[in-house]
Amino acid sequence: MSLLHLVSWNVNGVRAIMKKGFVESVKAMAPDVICLQETKAGEDESSESLDVLKSHHVYVNSSKARKGYSGTAIISKAEPINVTYDIGLEKYDQEGRVITAEFINYFLVTVYTPNSGDGLARLDYRESWDSEFNHYLSWLKKRKPVIVCGDFNVAHQPIDLARPKENYNKSAGYTQREIDGFSRMLDAGFVDSFRHFYPKEVKYSYWSFVTSGREKNVGWRIDHFLVDHRIMPAAKDALIYNEYHGSDHCPVGLKIEL
């Protein structure tokens, strides 16, 4: 067993963040695996941008439906046993939102959950996504324990966003239907690692550029590490790295002995 340091970061454009100290930030955090969301680049473009991390194994999943949209990546020091992409349902597999890396003792899944959009126009799609993604995770869990990380686009509790009353059932990421979808993942056997270690701490992982949210600390905690309850005793700490900039999200982390 060894202490693993896993990091997840919605980079809001992998090519853009390369110009904002991304490599230096990764070196400073020194993760064993870093998972990225919202890479906003084709597979060749993502791979080319991430080629600076030459000592790592890089896996990318890009949107097939819209160029420069969505997208995920996993960058690992150790080579996984196997890597798969998407969840096996065409309706949900067009936007490069999921990568699963299999290691000896666990699966690591990174996800960029669909945003419900302006006016909650995509809330129905989002709700059905949550259901199907949960089924996918349950299928994986039959084989070995699962850690799932990424931008889930939901603040689960009032403590997880700066203005809960103003946003409840009005803003994407804080409707009861989205909250319930996240709750069902927890009910299926996952633990919100940060809230487990820090039940009362107010800390955010996303701030709107438009409203200068980071300067005012008017934010949301929507980036999560969910840990299979069977291996949660092996988790040592969960982190939110507010000190790292370059995106409208900051990195989040998990330290676990596996």
Image (tube, rainbow, N blue to C red):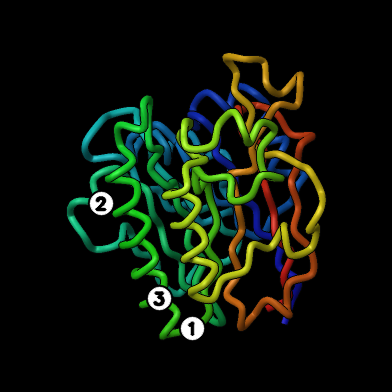
Q: Nearer the viewer, mark 1 or mark 2?
A: 2
Please report whichever mark, 2 or 3, sits nearer to the chain's N-terminal start: 2
Reading the image, the residue beneath label 1 is: 144
Reading the image, the residue beneath label 2 is: 92
Three-letter residue code for mark 2: Tyr
Circle 2 packing at 10 Å, graded few (<14), some (14-19), many (20+), is: some
Q: Position of residue 61 (x, y in %)?
A: 35, 48
Element carrying mark 2: helix
In this view, the residue farthest toward the front is 165
Reading the image, the residue beneath label 3 is: 138
Above or below, 110 relative to 231 = above
Above or below, 75 relative to 215 = below
Three-letter residue code for mark 1: Lys
Three-letter residue code for mark 3: Ser
Above or below, 242 relative to 110 = above
Q: Quadrant of residue 161?
A: top right
Q: Is residue 93 left or right of residue 248?
A: left
- Mark 1–mark 2 Cα distance, whole angstroms, equals 24 Å
* Residue at image point 19% right, 51% down: 91
